[in-house]
Amino acid sequence: MDVLGQDRREGLGRRAESRVTLLTLILVSILLLLSSLYSAEASVFRKARETVMDAAAPALAMFSGPISYIQKTVGDIGDYFNVMKQNEALREENAELRQWMNEALALRETVAAYEALSAYHAPPGVHPINAVVIGESNDVYSHSMLVNAGARDGVKSGQAVIDAAGLVGRIVDVGQNAARVLLLTDVQSRAPVYIEGADVEGLLVGRTKARPAISFTESSEPVIFAPGQRVLTSGAGGVLPRGIPIGVVAAEREGEAIVDLYANYARTRLVRVVNYKFPTVEPVEEEEPSADGTDEAGREAAAVAPETVQAAANATAPVSAPAALIAAEHTQAAPPPAPPEPADADEETSPEPVAD
Amino acid sequence: MTRRAESMSRLIKAATPTLLGLFGVFLLALPVRIAEGHIPTPLLPLVIVFFWSIYGPNYLPAASVFAIGLLQDFLSGGPLGLWPGVYLFTQYIVLSQRSYFLGREQKVVLIGFAFAAASAALIIWLVMSLMSGTLLPFRGLVGQMAVTIVSYPLFSAGFAQFHRRVIVENS
């Protein structure tokens, strides 16, 4: 170590000014911190963030490939040792899923019958964008991931990100070729949710721990829920679509529900950005004569009952879309290039012959 | 070797610790997930800042440290100014104690690093708690710092060889 002690003047810096520069830069850092405290969303910072993210994306993508290969290989070796146990677990799960499949097939028929009714208006379709996780924050207090899809692919800030298991998070920064996903465990994450079967809505608040908690709005009535109940996005606020599965209630602590997430962030690799537009209710305009008959029919369909469309969208309708997406992902090893679009029926196409 | 090639190689050697630091940040941004995410990724840039602040502060000037920290802020999505502040503070403390660390046994230096990592953790916890308006849990932070401290001897042995054989030698 004696050679290490030699003080040579070969480096990038000069000793004489180093202390002054150091203190100045510490001051600059503190000023930066204070400014991000007061204007976290300042456009200059946001632009800089997105530029750096875009610049780093190709290199991150190049390295994350081999890393995931190594992880998979190591995982395979691990699997080799408990293959019998896994087999047994999978067999049990398969039997259970078969029951669910039969139930789902029966339900599909019932739903098809309802969809054929003239009063039914399909919710807007979901157009997922496939992406691969190329980076993550590895920071104790900032939980986010970088994905290799950006504005060029149609990704926008606020969109939900799902994987095979459920909701992963939502998009916060969008570059041209990459985007940042704020995970549900981040301390800044807030997602409007409801507990299935308990009829309560709340906000899923990230706490930097593995399990976020649902905080309920103050009310005179006690909030009743039980461990094991499913937690789904509620669609309140008009950002995340309703009905995306998030996890199950694990326990109750100080009036809050602790949630076990379906998403396993240690394994999240392939994700889908849900490009979902909430239906907007537009005022019905005066009828204009149109040469195209079908166009007019479409407009009529849209104008029939805007409140029905809104109600359907806010109530249960989009549940089928992400759920079906997830189901599709379960059955396929890799997501298809052109993802299936269930419930894709637009106002023009879906309620076809029965509407007249 | 021509004079130009010589000065070029000198510049590259002088810039190596900075580039290593930036590479460390880059590694930190990759989804490495050691043991399926059960083991947090060690903070390699902190090791680099600490090591070169003792053994070759001229090779890692404050501007480089600032750049390393800023890149980490950009890639991790955290508040801007946090990591530059933490790394520069570490460098300030180490530089003020440099004469004590020079020539000491590596065990002593490791204890010094543990103190530096602990104070860095304290700053991060305080700042992030202040920014989020609640007292954040610090178990994860302690875990990450512990992994960094445990991996310090490994990294520092590698860096020492590198510094001795490549950067200082024949420069």
Image: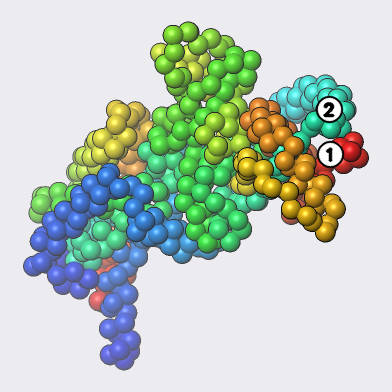
Task: Look at the image and tell me whether residue B86 can be seen.
Answer: no
Side of A52 relative to B66 (left or right):
right
Disc 1 versus disc 2: distance between alpha carbons? 11 Å
Circle on res. A315? none
The answer as to whether the residues below labels 1 and 2 share one chain is: yes
Q: Looking at the picture, how far across and down is residue B141, in whole percent?
A: 34, 35
Between A303 and A151, the residue placed more toward the observer is A303
Q: Looking at the picture, how far across and down is residue B113, in whole percent?
A: 23, 44
Side of A44 relative to B95 (left or right):
right
Q: Which residue is mark 2?
A: A114
Q: Secondary structure at mark 2?
A: helix
Quadrant hosting residue A118 = top right
Q: Is residue A116 above or below residue A339?
A: above
Q: Chain of mark 1?
A: A
Between A32 and B84, the residue placed more toward the observer is A32
Looking at the image, the residue that sits furthest to the right is A353
Quadrant hosting residue A12 = bottom left
Residue type at mark 1? Pro
Q: Chain of mark 2?
A: A
Quadrant position of the N terminus of chain A in the picture: bottom left
The mark closer to the camera, 1 or 2, is 1
**Could you tell which of marks 1 and 2 lies nearer the N-terminus?**
2
Side of A143 relative to A233 (left or right):
left
Q: Looking at the picture, how far across and down is residue A217, in whole percent?
A: 44, 19
Identity of the residue drawn at 83% across and 57% down:
A292
Between A278 and A2, the residue placed more toward the observer is A278
Q: Residues within 10 Å of mark 2 (few under 14, many from 20)?
A: few
Q: Which residue is mark 1?
A: A351
Between B14 and B26, the residue placed more toward the observer is B26
